[in-house]
Amino acid sequence: MEHTISSVKENIGVVFDECNFHDVFNVSDIEKILSGIYKSWDSSLYRQYLKKFKIPERKQIGFFSKGMKMKLSIICAMAHKPKLLILDEATTGLAPVVRDEMLDLFLEFIQDEECSIFFSSHITSDIQKIADYVILIHQGKIIFEEQKDDLVYHFGIVKCGREKFASISPDDYIIHRVTNVSVECLVRDKEAIRRKYKDIVVDNATLEDIMLFYIKGGAA
């Protein structure tokens, strides 16, 4: 049993929203610690990542910027070649350029079909860039679980006046809300709605639009 648990840990890399390494350590200190913990630790890969992301080797972590600390946390999670990366808001608060670098690294990681990433994030653009499946959790409950491509390419938003809204069957939309100037509906198949209601505008829906519809709900 102990051997099984150890094997599972070897295959998991975890990154939190803050760097948890002690401020007095440098990257060599971190390597000495982690190489003793993970049998699969790859020093060559670790050094390769350090060079690629310009992480200073002699500087104490306490003097790193937030971006460098998060880069180091992610590098350490990946240097023992896990099969699963668990990321808890790992890109939150990073500068756009740094975040983009990390997302590109994650995309490289999942090119290997045996590797997966499970991550939580409030940054919908990050989710849209790297996720295959999206689970929306609100107040501790799962609101939906959908393939990302279905959400992005098939969902849409109907915008119309109250009179035209009255002509739309409740079966054709998921949620509706009333604004000061119109009624908006979230629909699952925008092309089908466009064909059925030719005089009604159906816009594309972003991931953020969809999430806000589900969280805020409809209005009578």
Image (tube, rainbow, N blue to C red):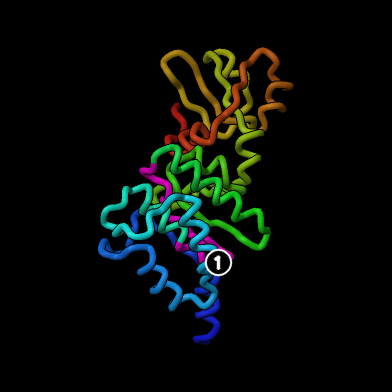
Q: From the viewer's perspective, is 122 left or right of 60?
A: right
Q: How many marks?
A: 1
Where does the C terminus fall, quadrant-wise? top left
**Residue at image location 69% in from the left, 21% down from the top:** 194
Give the magenta range: 76-94
Asked whether 88 falls inside the magenta stretch, the response is yes
- Which residue is nearer to you in this view: 185 or 124? 124
Across and down, in percent, residue 119 comes to: 49, 53
- Which residue is nearer to you in this view: 214 or 65? 65
Q: From the viewer's perspective, is 123 left or right of 172?
A: left
**Residue at image location 67% in from the left, 32% down from the top:** 189
Q: From the viewer's perspective, is 157 left or right of 19?
A: right
Of helix, strand and loop, which one carries label 1?
A: loop
**Residue at image location 42% in from the left, 69% down from the top:** 31
Work out whether 83 lies above or below 199: below
Residue on which disc 1 sits: 82
Q: Amino acid at mark 1?
A: Pro
